[in-house]
Image (cartoon, helix red, strand yellow):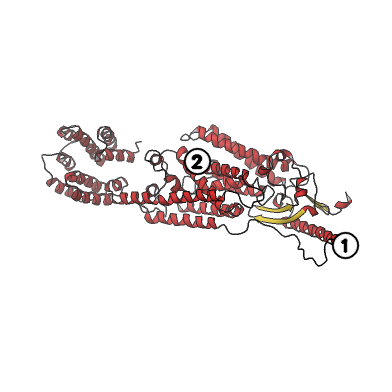
């Protein structure tokens, strides 16, 4: 034993914990590969393999960090009177005089000591294994050395106390030596080394975003088109108020849904889980990079999640939720941690982020809560954008800056996202109001009483088409089990000219004609298409869905697109599950 290391304590790695983490990573990777070879039937296999490849790349990076510690035969940490041998530099002793200041950073899943080194001493350090070949902008500055206490065998508080004791002794010995040499005066009030945390303050943007998500969910319950079921908005409400839907975005140009869906949630459990995850992400990440880039990464990831959800999920999926943005933040934590490899974001913080990120990406590690469907496609899209944006950010983050550059650009993007989402309230409000007042929309939404009232109003507003609205009012009343349906139809028929069309349709519903007889009374192609549609309604009211479906398909192919019967046939086929 060297004389300068008379007081020496060695701490080995807790290889049981490291092995458990590594096995979870291997099992997750095996599951990802299995998912690639056995993709769900309704998912694009190329898209599945794309995301599996991303995970494999992430696994390789995490394995390169974990394996050296797992396979190492050296102690994980050595503390002696001569200095400290840190995990990342096992062959080099770091003298106490090289340490300018230190922090102890504790979180739910981490407990680390961060050493801030003198620049000259930092330049003499060399990393081991593959990490030593990576660029410094990826691995983090050597001027900050991290000592992860929780991956070592021993009580973290005991290790920290011993570190502080020896550091204080070395510092005091150095002061006394300098006083004897006359380098400093005895009365100088130099303080002992103090922590220099750069992550203080409160995650204000996280608080604002949490309040916004809760307020939006309250609005969903308040302004929904249908009463909530057990406190959960219906799919119809989610669609109308801004959820993503492939046909509406691709065919109708409602691209603004990509910006509104991330603020919405499909249930109270969905909202609660996302809020807890966002709270954790904000406390971990916003104070690290600043609210500007935190907001930009969240909104960009949310947008990526919306796009992936529309692209990968089944066409009839209604997507909502901030999960894409939140998962993107955790992916960004892991990517950004390579800058802070020797700073507050250490290996253990990556593990903490991965514990939320990995189950969010792989279906076999998560289960739907409360019967809800988990949008893994949105999670993948958000994680991809979050990791990519954070990695790009590292290349333009000077070491001397506490937060990334181009904060103004990040603020501009976030502002644009919020403006688009806020401006989308205009089409959402108009659509909602139209549906509330539109009897046809109420009819196909199953709100038959409101539909019948709306059709009755239309009869007074549009006398030339009043007979058709009377027919639709009868169908709505019949669907809603209104006992006055037949009586009201008889009154309407008595006011209709029996020698003109569509009086024969009244006769069909009153039982005076059969479907074939109605077709015989149609004088031209337009009347025949109408007769075909109302015959379908007659069969549907009688419970014969197969015959009704055939009539609706024929009406859809023969009626002009401007006719009520065309929209009616399309709506009935959708209700019957025909694409």
Q: Is residue 559 above or below residue 259?
A: above
**Which quadrant of the structure image shows residue 163?**
bottom right
In this rendering, position of residue 286 left or right of residue 135: left
Q: Residue at x 86, y 60 (%)?
A: 177
- Frontmost residue, 474 versus 8: 8
Secondary structure under tag 2 reads helix
Counting residues from the start of the chain, the first of labels 2 and 1 encountered is: 1
* Residue located beneath label 1 in the image: 180
Looking at the image, which residue sits at the far bottom?
187
Percent across and percent down for residue 449 are: 27, 51
Q: Residue at x 74, y 42 (%)?
A: 127
- Asked whether disc 2 touches disc 1, contact meaning CB atoms under 8 Å apart, the reply is no
Q: Quadrant of the C terminus?
A: top left
* Residue located beneath label 2 in the image: 377
Q: Could you classify mark 2 by the number of other residues whose Cα lies within 10 Å: few (under 14), some (14-19), or many (20 or more)?
A: many
- Frontmost residue, 496 versus 248: 248
Looking at the image, which residue sits at the far right?
3
Tell which tag, 2 or 1, sits nearer the viewer: 1
In this rendering, position of residue 160 left or right of residue 423: right
Q: CA distance from mark 2 to mark 1?
A: 68 Å
In this rendering, position of residue 393 left or right of residue 520: right
Specify whether residue 374 is in view. no
Percent across and percent down for residue 568 are: 27, 40
The circle drawn on residue 192 is none
Q: Could you classify mark 1 by the number of other residues whose Cα lies within 10 Å: few (under 14), some (14-19), or many (20 or more)?
A: few
């Amino acid at each position: 034993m060297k004389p300068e290391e008379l007081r020496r304590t060695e701490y080995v790695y807790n290889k049981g914990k490291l092995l458990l983490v590594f096995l979870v990573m291997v099992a997750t990777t095996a599951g990802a590969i299995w998912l690639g070879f056995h993709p769900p039937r309704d998912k694009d296999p190329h898209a599945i393999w794309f995301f599996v490849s991303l995970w494999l790349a992430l696994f390789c990076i995490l394995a390169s960090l974990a394996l050296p510690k797992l396979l190492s035969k050296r102690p994980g940490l050595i503390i002696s009177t001569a200095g400290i041998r840190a995990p990342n530099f096992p062959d080099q002793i770091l003298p106490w005089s090289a340490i300018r200041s230190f922090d102890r950073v504790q979180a739910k899943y981490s407990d680390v000591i961060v050493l801030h080194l003198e620049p000259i001493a930092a330049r003499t350090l060399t990393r081991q294994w593959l990490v030593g070949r990576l660029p410094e902008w990826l691995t983090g500055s050597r001027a900050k050395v991290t000592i992860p206490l929780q991956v070592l065998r021993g009580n973290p508080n005991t290790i920290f106390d011993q570190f502080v004791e020896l550091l204080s002794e070395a510092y005091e010995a150095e002061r006394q030596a300098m006083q004897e040499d006359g380098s400093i005066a005895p009365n100088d009030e130099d303080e002992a080394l103090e922590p220099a945390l750069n992550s203080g303050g409160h995650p204000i943007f996280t608080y604002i975003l949490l309040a916004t998500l809760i307020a939006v969910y309250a609005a969903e319950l308040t302004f929904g088109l249908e009463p909530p079921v057990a406190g959960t908005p219906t799919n119809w409400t989610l669609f109308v108020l801004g959820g993503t839907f492939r046909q509406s975005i691709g065919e109708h140009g409602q691209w603004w849904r990509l910006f509104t869906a991330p603020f919405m949630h499909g249930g109270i459990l969905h909202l609660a889980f996302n809020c807890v995850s966002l709270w954790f992400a904000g406390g971990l990440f916003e104070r690290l990079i600043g609210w500007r880039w935190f907001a930009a990464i969240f909104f960009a990831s949310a947008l990526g999640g919306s796009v992936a959800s529309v692209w990968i999920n089944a066409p009839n999926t209604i997507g909502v939720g901030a999960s894409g943005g939140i998962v993107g933040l955790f992916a960004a934590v892991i990517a950004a941690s390579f800058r802070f490899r020797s700073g507050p974001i250490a290996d253990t913080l990556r593990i903490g982020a991965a514990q939320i990120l990995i189950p969010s990406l792989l279906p076999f590690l998560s289960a739907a809560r409360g019967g809800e469907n988990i949008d893994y496609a949105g999670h993948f899209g958000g994680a991809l954008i979050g990791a990519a944006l954070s990695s790009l950010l590292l290349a333009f983050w000077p070491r001397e800056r506490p937060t990334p550059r181009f904060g103004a650009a990040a603020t501009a993007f976030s502002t644009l996202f919020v403006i688009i989402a806020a401006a989308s309230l205009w089409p959402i409000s108009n659509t909602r109001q139209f549906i509330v007042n539109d009897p046809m929309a109420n009819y196909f939404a199953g709100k038959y009483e409101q539909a019948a009232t709306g059709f009755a109003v239309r009869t007074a507003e549009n006398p030339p088409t009043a007979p058709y609205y009377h027919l639709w009012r009868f169908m709505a009343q019949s669907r809603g089990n209104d006992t006055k349906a037949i009586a009201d139809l008889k009154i309407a028929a008595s006011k209709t000219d029996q020698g003109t069309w569509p009086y024969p349709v009244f006769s069909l519903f009153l039982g005076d004609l059969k479907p074939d007889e109605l077709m015989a009374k149609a004088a031209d192609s337009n009347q025949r298409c109408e007769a075909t549609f109302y015959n379908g309604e007659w069969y549907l009211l009688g419970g014969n869905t197969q015959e009704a479906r055939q009539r609706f398909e024929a009406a859809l192919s023969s009626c002009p697109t401007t006719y009520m019967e065309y929209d009616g046939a399309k709506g009935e086929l959708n209700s019957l599950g025909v694409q």
